[in-house]
Amino acid sequence: MVELAHATRLHPLQAGNPDVASASVTLADNATRVSLRGRADAVAALSGTLGLALPTKQKTTATSGSRAALWLGPDEWLIIDDVDSSVVADLAEAKVLHSAVDISHRNVGIIVDGRGAAAVVNGGCPQDLSLKAFPVGAASRTVLGKIEIVLWRNAENRFRVECWRSFANYAYAFLRESARDVAV
């Protein structure tokens, strides 16, 4: 007599961490986030205020300590720093024309980490995540499933997904389900 293997089907919304050896999906620590806008003639002064050189090319980032600046457009950056950061006050002192809006409570960060991280993100993101096309330090505004996200590759096998708080449950569940698929 031959014994058949039995599979256990998980409900897609089942609580708890999936048993995933190739990637983990976790919530990022709370952070200070600023949507920064400024013309090209303000970049040098804003860089000095922030203590890092604002990136000026697509898909690039700059970091200094816990502070990161992600290029989102020719005049737009997402600044991410520790939750108790003085970045908002620092930018208020800048003597150049710019817009700095604290969006700390609007966004949520999700970390996808592990050797299968790119496959997990690609489960719902059409971005080419090969190291050649999207190297460590790359960031872009893109989509995950049906929502807009900012995606930042901050290590070879680690991504930070930033999304609006109203989409956080969707993004988190989507990435966890994708992690389960990648693990299979």
Image: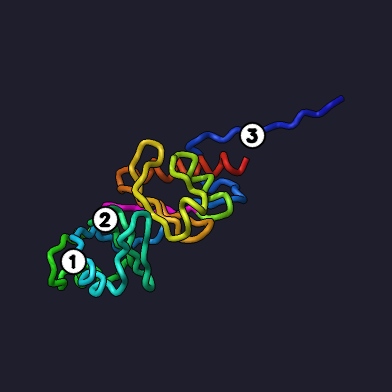
Residue 90 location, quadrant: bottom left
Magenta residues span 106-112
Which numbered circle lies on residue 8?
Answer: 3
**Residue at 53%, 45% in the rendered image:** 119
Distance between mark 1 and mark 3 Cα atoms = 58 Å
Quadrant for the C terminus in the image: top right
**Residue at 26%, 52% in the rendered image:** 106
Residue 161 at what x, y percent from top left?
Answer: 40, 51
Specify whether residue 54 is painted magenta. Answer: no
**For residue 24, above or below residue 34:** above
Q: Residues within 10 Å of mark 3 (few under 14, many from 20)?
A: few
**For residue 76, above or below residue 119:** below
| Residue closer to the observer: 28 or 68 | 68
The residue singled out by tag 1 in the image is 42
Quick one: SS at disc 1?
Answer: helix
Q: Is residue 46 left or right of residue 147?
A: left
Please identify, in this view, whether the residue under mark 1 or under mark 3 is nearer the observer: 1
Residue 127 at what x, y percent from top left?
Answer: 44, 44
Of all residues, the one furthest to the top in this rendering is: 1
**Which amino acid, by three-letter code, is at mark 1?**
Ala
Q: Are marks 1 and 3 in contact (CB under 8 Å)?
A: no
Which numbered circle lies on residue 74?
Answer: none
**Residue at 15%, 62% in the rendered image:** 98
**Which amino acid, by three-letter code, is at mark 3?**
Thr
Residue 131 at what x, y percent from top left?
Answer: 51, 54
Predominant secondary structure in magenta? strand
Distance between mark 2 and mark 3 Cα atoms = 39 Å
Dot 2 or dot 3: first in sequence order is: 3
Q: Residues within 10 Å of mark 2 (few under 14, many from 20)?
A: few
The residue singled out by tag 2 in the image is 105
Distance between mark 1 and mark 2 Cα atoms = 26 Å
